[in-house]
Amino acid sequence: MTHTQDPRSLIGVTGLDQVLHGGLIPRRAYLIRGGPGSGKTTLGMHFLVAERPSESLLVSLGEAEEQLRDNARRSGLPFEDVNVLDVSPGQASDIGSEAYNLLESWDVEGNSIHDRILDHVRAHRPARILIDSLSQMRYLSADTFQFRKQVLSLLRTLTSEGATVMFTSEESADEDDQALPFLSDGVISLEPTEYGRLCRITKFRGSGFEEGTHFYQLGKEGMTLYPRLMPNKFFRTHSHTQISTGLSELDALTHGGIERGTVTLLSGPTGVGKTTLGAQLMSQGAASGERAVIYNFDENASTFFTRCRQIGLPVEDMVDTGNLRFEAVEPLLYHPDQFAASVREEVEEAGTTMVMIDSLSGYQQSMCGENLQARVHALCRYLVNMGVTVVLVNEVFTITGSQARVTEQGLSYVADNIIMLRYIELDGELCKTIGVLKKRTGSFEKALREFDINQDGLQVGRALHGMRGLMSGVPEMIQPNHRRDMS
């Protein structure tokens, strides 16, 4: 006998259904936990309007119906057809005409609310139910045992009637609140933090889900969630053909350019020309038919385009053709999950094949207390799996010196290619050099070459032979016969 799985019930929150591997399992009960202002009710409203709002019911134990509908309207949610049952404690219609004293009110009022919800559900048969907030029933029960008994009875009856149920609760250390996750089939936790709002799935019976925290926002379109990037879930076949750098001397240095689907790290101190070299690689790729995007965390478009225009780099022309896109990113306004979602959209929907991140220091400002190394690893692994060519701009904090670091963040292992730009002092002048330190997919020239940027563009010059101490920044001339014979 063949068993078919029930189709999932979509929540309707961008990203959250993906985290839940397609949505909720129907005819089960799910808890939404979080503090005040975390977005519990907004999430529940998304659930009610995602499919056939006229078959949905919101049971309110706190807010009035008029206020709930106004909040939904302000969140951009079409809530007009959703049925609202207001069973806020203390209403005469909830209690009936029986007289009771204060000590008896828990049992009388709690049972009345319980029964009224069930009567309404049996009469109207809603497919989706949101109870907001079940925390209120805690105050209407004489003790924890009675509270658990009432909640379990209510949830079991509602799901047996064919409804998929969501219920909200204020998260606390209270014993009653700690019991609710055990009575539910799934738990969605919402937590506002100093680094932004984070969602975590802590329980989901009968299905897998994406673990960890996921950033979400509340705005004019309700809730939007950005799933944490898991690179091993993505793959696209591609070939490691070479992309010319557009500079014959640099092609000679790299033995043909950089390969598609690899990560190239441009390493150097401030002002040495890392961004300009990256722009050269991206504009050349765009001119060759690649779809390229530059994410710049350090400067705006006006400054970037002006600098490129001054040295004759045709970045704006490539933007006009649509093959190149430039986006200035304000790191303090972007969470890493949000940025990763933006990159995924470019790759999967716009067909982007080259991505440049300038710089890793700027990107670090958006980390919100998270580990930069883990985030860069995940993003680069995803891009490489999708066949995207990646250029990372990394600033080292020493101008010259014996410690020739490639990166301050321990990220050199991520790179397939490492191109170093460095300063040296010759005859009292500050000069620039370029060299290749690493190339996983092939050989490269071992020499350091002269490097300059002027009105004619990027200039890669002759190899700097006959000197030692170049990496220290203060080289010395040596006699030709002192050079090791490599033949």
Image (tube, rainbow, N blue to C red):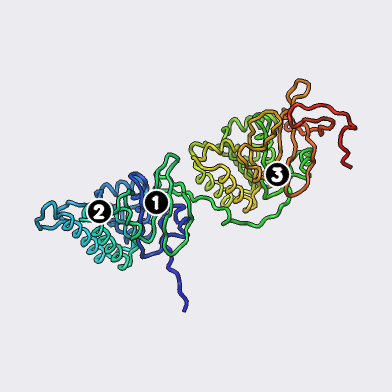
Quadrant into which the C terminus falls: top right
The image quadrant of residue 201 is: bottom left
Decide if residue 132 is in sight here: no
**Residue 261 located left or right of residue 35:** right
Image spot of residue 365 (x, y percent): 53, 36
Residue denoted by label 2 = 138
Looking at the image, is 115 positioned above or below residue 397? Answer: below
**Residue 251 located left or right of residue 74:** right
Q: Nearer the viewer, residue 70 or 212?
A: 212
Q: CA distance from mark 1 to mark 3?
A: 41 Å
At 9% from the left and 56% from the top, the residue drawn is 99
The image quadrant of residue 53 is: bottom left
Can you tell which mark lies on residue 189?
A: 1
Q: Amino acid at mark 3?
A: Asn
**N-term-proximal mark, 2 vs 3:** 2
Q: Nearer the viewer, residue 21 or 420?
A: 420
**Residue 13 located left or right of residue 111:** right
Q: Amino acid at mark 2?
A: Arg
Q: Residues within 10 Å of mark 3 (few under 14, many from 20)?
A: many
**N-term-proximal mark, 1 vs 3:** 1
User: Dot 1 lies on which element?
Assistant: strand
Residue denoted by label 3 = 417
**Residue 9 located left or right of residue 278:** left
User: Dot 3 lies on which element?
Assistant: strand
Q: Amino acid at mark 1?
A: Ser
Image spot of residue 470 (x, y percent): 77, 31
User: Dot 2 lies on which element?
Assistant: helix
**N-term-proximal mark, 1 vs 2:** 2
